[in-house]
Amino acid sequence: MHTAKEGDAWAAEPGGVALFVRLTPKGGRDAFDGVEARADGRRVLKARVRAAPENGRANAALVALIAAALHAPKSAVSIRAGETSRVKTVFVAGDPAAYLDALAKLAPTNG
């Protein structure tokens, strides 16, 4: 089983997992592009969606992408911070262990 560690692009929390995501709207496809180290040393999961960043469409597409990748209901996924920013904190409610395993397979370059 994968466990989150300092510097990961995600962190287990009580009741779920927090993801640190850099979103590219109008990215041509809905997909994850691995993990990136930011200039400040933080690591983020890179995601792209086809939707434009208008009226919350790109955020909604990100929620759907994360829910599908983690086999979680969309209602379990919420944007906690960065609603209007490219870098967001997304929380996925549920069993952290299952999500950590799925994330490790999704972006194996994370550690």
Image (spheres, rainbow, N blue to C red):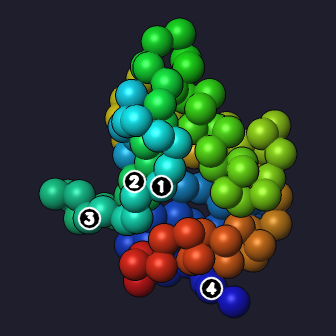
In the rendered structure, which disc, 1 or 4, sits on the residue that comes first in sequence? Answer: 4
Identify the residue at image location x=78%, y=39%.
74
Q: CA distance from mark 2 to mark 4?
A: 19 Å
Q: Is residue 89 above or below residue 44?
A: above
Residue assigned mark 1: 32
Helix, strand, or loop for circle 2?
strand
Left or right: residue 78 versus residue 98 is: left
In the rendered image, which residue does mark 4 sit on? 2
Do tag 2 and tag 3 residues touch (Cβ < 8 Å)?
no
On the image, the x and y values in percent for residue 85 come to 37, 29
Residue found at x 71% / y 67%: 99
In the drawing, does residue 78 fall left or right of residue 94? Answer: left
Is the residue marked by circle 4 packed among few (<14), some (14-19), or many (20+) residues within 10 Å? few
Quadrant hosting residue 8 = bottom left
The residue beneath circle 3 is 37
Q: Are marks 1 and 2 in contact (CB under 8 Å)?
A: yes
